[in-house]
Image: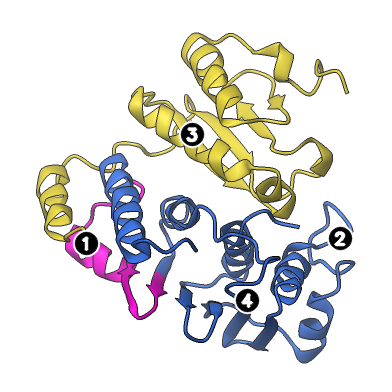
Chain colours: A blue, B yellow
C-alpha cells in the first residue's frame, strides 16, 4: 500500500508515460461539502482492450517482464475502496485511458494526499518530452498548471533546464499552499 | 499565486545558452528505479534530492534519470551509477540522506560509498 495518494498518482502516471501518451491530465479536487477527494488521471496513450482493463486490477497481471506482479493499479484501487470511495478505469485502444479514484475526504482510513508538488515536479521535469495538465482544487479554489502554456512562454528553453525546474517547483509549492489555506488534505 | 511573468524573465535570461547538456560519452548517468516498488519505498525524494544536489553543485557531466523496475524490488529505492569506463555501482535501500553522501563522495570525489552498495550491505 502506498503511504501517500501522491505516490500512487506518480505511479499511475508512469503507466501513461509507458503507454506513449503525449498529454497527461492529472486532476485532484477536494470538496468538504460532498466529503470527497476525486483524483482523475487521464491520458492519450495507446489505451487498453476491455480484456486488458479487466486484468489490470489483478495484482498478478503486468505487461513488464522483470517481475510477475503489477501492484500500481491494485494499490490505488485498494486505497480508494478502503477510504469508502470508488475506483474506475475507462480505456479505449488508440484513444487513451482514464483512471478515476474517489476517496471519502474525512474517512479515517484515507491516506494523506502527501507531497503533491514533489509528484508533479518529478513528472514534469523528468519527462520534458510530455505535456501535463495539472489541476488542484479545494472547495472551489485552486489552480492549473499546463506545460503547453509554460512551453509557449519559454520558447525553446526546455522544462528540465535547472532554472525552469526550480521555477516549476516553487510554482507548485506556492500554489498548493495557497489552495490548501487552513485545510489539511 | 505565483505569476507567469517570472517564467518570461527566465526565458529572456536563458535564451541562447541552452542545449549545452547533450549526452556525451563523458557523462555519468545516475539512474533511479521509479516503478511501483521504488515509489512505495521512497524513491521520489531520493530522485529529487539527487537532481537538486547535482544542479546546486553544478556537476555538468552528471545526468540524473529515472527507469522502471530494476528487478530487485526488495532492495528499493535503488540508485545505479554508470560512470564512463567503470563498472556499474548499485546502491540499495537509499534515502535522501544517503543520496547526499553519494553525491558528495561518489559523484564529486569518485569514491564509492561501499557501505550502501548491493555487494556490501549486510542483507
Q: CA distance from mark 2 to mark 3?
A: 29 Å
- Chain for disc number 4: A
Disc 2 versus disc 1: distance between alpha carbons?
A: 42 Å
Asked whether the residues under marks 4 and 1 belong to the same chain, the reply is: no
* Residue A74 painted magenta: no
Numbered disc in front, either 2 or 3: 3
Q: Residue at x 65, y 31 (%)?
A: B80
Q: Between residue A36 and residue A146, name the one nearer to us.
A: A36
Q: CA distance from mark 4 to mark 1?
A: 27 Å
Residue for badge 3: B49
Task: Tell whether A141 sits left or right of B120.
Answer: left
Mark 2 or mark 4, earlier in chain: 2
Label 1 sits on residue: B1
Disc 3 secondary structure class: helix
Which image quarter holds the N terminus of chain A? Answer: bottom right
Report the disc number at residue A69: 2
Query: Residue B31's x, y, as percent?
Result: 60, 37
Kindly check if marks 2 and 4 are in contact, taking CB atoms under 8 A apart as contact. Answer: no
- Please identify, in this view, whether the residue under mark 4 or under mark 3 is nearer the observer: 4
The numbered disc on residue A77 is: none
Residue A148 vs B18, above or below: the answer is below
- Which label is found at residue A103? 4
Residue placed at 24% from the left, 42% from the top? Answer: B18
* Upstream in sequence: badge 1 or badge 3: 1
Q: Are marks 1 and 3 in contact (CB under 8 Å)?
A: no
Q: Is residue A10 left or right of residue A120?
A: right
Q: Magenta span covers which residues?
A: A133-160
Amino acid at each position: 500500500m502506498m503511504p501517500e495518494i501522491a505516490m500512487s498518482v506518480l505511479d499511475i502516471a508512469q503507466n501513461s508515460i509507458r503507454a506513449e501518451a503525449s498529454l497527461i491530465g492529472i486532476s485532484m479536487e477536494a470538496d468538504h461539502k460532498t466529503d470527497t477527494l476525486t483524483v482523475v488521471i487521464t491520458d492519450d496513450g495507446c489505451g487498453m482492450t476491455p480484456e486488458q482493463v479487466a486484468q489490470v486490477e489483478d495484482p498478478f497481471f503486468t505487461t513488464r517482464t522483470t517481475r510477475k506482479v503489477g501492484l500500481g493499479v491494485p494499490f490505488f484501487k485498494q486505497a480508494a475502496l478502503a477510504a469508502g470511495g470508488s475506483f474506475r478505469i475507462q480505456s479505449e485502444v488508440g484513444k487513451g485511458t482514464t483512471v478515476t479514484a474517489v476517496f471519502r475526504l474525512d474517512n479515517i482510513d484515507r491516506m494523506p494526499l502527501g507531497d503533491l508538488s514533489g509528484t508533479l515536479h518529478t513528472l514534469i521535469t523528468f519527462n520534458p518530452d510530455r505535456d501535463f495538465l495539472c489541476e488542484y482544487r479545494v472547495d472551489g479554489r485552486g489552480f492549473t498548471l499546463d506545460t503547453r502554456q509554460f512551453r509557449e512562454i519559454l520558447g525553446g528553453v526546455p522544462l528540465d533546464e535547472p532554472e525552469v525546474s526550480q521555477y516549476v517547483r516553487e510554482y507548485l509549492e506556492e500554489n498548493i499552499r495557497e489552495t490548501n489555506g487552513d485545510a489539511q488534505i | 499565486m505565483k505569476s507567469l511573468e517570472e517564467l518570461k524573465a527566465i526565458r529572456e535570461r536563458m535564451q541562447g545558452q541552452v542545449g549545452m547538456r547533450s549526452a556525451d560519452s563523458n557523462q555519468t548517468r545516475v539512474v533511479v528505479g521509479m516503478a511501483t516498488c521504488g515509489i512505495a519505498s521512497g524513491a521520489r525524494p531520493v530522485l529529487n534530492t539527487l537532481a537538486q544536489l547535482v544542479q546546486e553543485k553544478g556537476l555538468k557531466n552528471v545526468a540524473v534519470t529515472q527507469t522502471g523496475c530494476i528487478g530487485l524490488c526488495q532492495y528499493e529505492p535503488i540508485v545505479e551509477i554508470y560512470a564512463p569506463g567503470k563498472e556499474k555501482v548499485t546502491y540499495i535501500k537509499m534515502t535522501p540522506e544517503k543520496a547526499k553522501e553519494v553525491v558528495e563522495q561518489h559523484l564529486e570525489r569518485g569514491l564509492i560509498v561501499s557501505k550502501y552498495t548491493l555487494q556490501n550491505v549486510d542483507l
